Image: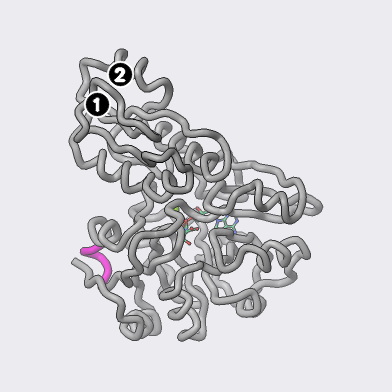
Amino acid sequence: MAKIGADIKFVQALLQQSDVAGIPTETVYGLAANALDANAVAKIFKVKERPSFDPLIVHTSSLEQATSFVEAIPDRARVLADKFWPGPLTLILKKTDRIPDIVTSGLDTVAVRVPNHPLTLQLLKSIDFPLAAPSANPFGYVSPTNANHVNEQLGDKIEYVLDGGECAVGIESTIVGFDGDDVVVHRLGGCRVEDIEKCIGQVKVEVNSSSNPTAPGMLDSHYAPLTPMVLGNIYELMEANKHLNIGVLAFQKAVQGVGRNHQFVLSEKGDIDEAATRLFTGLRQLDTLNLQLIISAYVPEQGLGRAINDRLRRAEAKRN
Ligand code: TXA
Ligand code: MG
């Protein structure tokens, strides 16, 4: 198993030696390596068993730091960075040659973000290179939102997980690209589309799917537990699947007719942000129960609810 602790110096040394480490962010835990070092980045792909066509996000400590490896920063990108960084927003920008092709899967753009976590910001400030970091889970599985999640799945392949507690947001960053006059949301995430639009006006949301060549990683079946999952009216689905050993991922209230230990309630007070922080823990927990089916329902489609519903839809898609 990996060591879990708060030894920033140790992580710094690992990264300087072209090794990888688990790091906390406010969204989910990342599996980090020196983004300017192709050999180090190759280790990320190996540990995650991630296909090389799925590009990584590069983490940096400030917009100024990013200017050393991106070309022009569009005006609206700058406005968004000023407003939301550090925070759960990733910007797709034209890259320079300093970023090796392996990071971007050969694209001429790079995904960049400044994560809002004190330990990781301190780490980023203590090194003179940015960190490529995908979510620290095996490819296609649910992202980790605490250090133990990382250790459970990647612990035998990595040496250290920097422990920053539970992730405050709990779902991945919102990914935004710039296409001529258009601002395009490629992945719904921890930064609300409503807040982005308040800042720069209307944006396009194009999050579907594997066929979207600008976000090759957005496969339909991403973010999925191993147990099959189905979405809809929970009571109808319970009735239709009563011959199966089922579990329920409920938004606010546990349902009647399924044992409480086969249920995970996302937010007793019906708070969507709290539901987001608990979503992946809930899916992981249900996934340990040897269920035949997880039943769930969409949450209200507003704020982070849009990102939660996107993850639920992808988890259901894994079934087919
Ligand atoms: O919150 C997050 O974004 C977390 C934390 C660790 O920062 N990271 C994360 O990384 O979710 P990952 O690798 O699981 O997802 C990154 C996704 C890729 O799957 C791809 O869809 C998109 O970012 N991406 C990366 N580079 C891109 C590019 N140049 N153009 C379009 N999409 C890109
Ligand atoms: Mg991921």
| Residue 18 picture location, percent across and down | 38, 79
* Front residue of 246 and 45: 246
- State the residue position of label 2: 238
Q: In the image, residue 201 lies at what x, y percent?
A: 77, 50
Q: Residue at x 58, y 60 (%)?
A: 90
Determine whether label 2 and label 1 are within 8 Å by CB: yes
**What amino acid is at disc 1?**
Ile
In magenta segment, residue 66: no
- Position of residue 118 relative to residue 262, above or below, is below
The reply to whether residue 108 is in sight is no
Name the element at disc 2: helix
Residue 225 x/y as whole percent: 32, 40
Residue type, numbered disc 2: Met
Would residue 246 appear left or right of 231 to someone viewing this image?
left
Left or right: 250 as drawn, with respect to 285: right
Q: Magenta part of the protein: which range?
A: 155-159
Q: Which residue is mark 1?
A: 246
**Relative to the observer, which residue lies in front, 100 or 33?**
33
